[in-house]
Structure formats: C-alpha cells, structure tokens
Image (tube, rainbow, N blue to C red):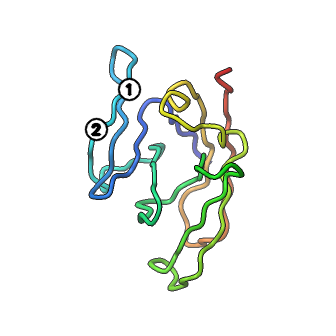
Amino acid sequence: MSTYSVNTQLQPKGSTGVVDWKRHANGTAVWERTLWKKLEVGDIVLLHDNEQVPADIVVLATSDPDGMCYLETKNLDGETNLKPRKSVKATMGISSEEDLERSSFYLDSEPSHQNLYLYHGVLRYEDPV
C-alpha cells in the first residue's frame, strides 16, 4: 500500500474538464480549471449528477444525507444498471469548500487493478473540530 497526502492539492471536475483546487503559499485555496489528463493520485474530484467519473475514486462525501450515490459503469464493463456506493463514514460530513480546506486525511491505498468490485484502502482522517 502507498500513502498519499490529499490536503495540498484538491481537484473537482467541471463539465468540460477538471476544476483544480490549488493551495497557494499564503494558505488560501482557489478553484482553477484543468484537464482530466492532469489528475494525479491524491487529487479530490467533485462530481455532479450525470457527469462521467474521470478516474478511480473513493467517495468521500455526497449531497445525500446518508452518503449514498449511484454509479453507472457501462464504459468499463458494459453494464447499464446503477451501482450504489456509500461515502466514507468519517468524511461524509464534508459539505463545503471550507469543510474541505479544514480537513486533513491520508489514504493508504492498494494500487489500481482490473477488479471493479473490490477495493482495499485505509483512510486516516483528523476531525477539524
């Protein structure tokens, strides 16, 4: 497993590319547009309804109060039915840019592999209380 820090560069996806969340030297963070191909391991991606997922992801939070979302994998396995996914319990309370900026967490993750239905990782999260 590898450890990746995700509190230095955060990236949400826009409809024509990816919006990049950059932390500047003065400690503030801003959204900047970038391309999918520039996503790196450890980036955070914001997805909206009916947008394609540009990379392998771990669901940190959703707009659903129970942390649920539904993914279609037809581009990967040909299946058109929606697959339920639930956000990580520790991070499901992140609901704003401010919450995200105050958060600090690390993901110990297995490398990418072909199995779409199996994933092992450990998220270490420090509550910003």
Residue positioned 45% across, 62% down in the render: 53
Percent x, y for residue 83?
63, 72
Please indicate whether residue 113 sits to the left or right of residue 19 in the image.
right
Front residue (pair 15, 25): 15
Q: Which mark is residue 32?
A: 2
* Secondary structure under the numbered disc 1 in the rendered image: strand
Percent x, y for residue 112?
53, 61
Please indicate whether residue 59 sits to the left or right of residue 120 in the image.
left
Disc 1 residue type (three-letter): Ala
Per the image, the residue denoted by label 1 is 29
Front residue (pair 37, 17): 17
Viewport quadrant of the C terminus = top right
- Asked if 23 appears above or below 20 in the picture, the reply is above
Percent x, y for residue 84?
66, 67
Choose top left, top right, bottom left or bottom right for residue 50.
bottom left
Tell me the crowding category of disc 2: few under 14, some 14 to 19, or many 20 or more residues within 10 angstroms, Cα based: few
Residue positioned 52% across, 75% down in the render: 73
- Asked if 76 appears above or below 84 in the picture, the reply is below
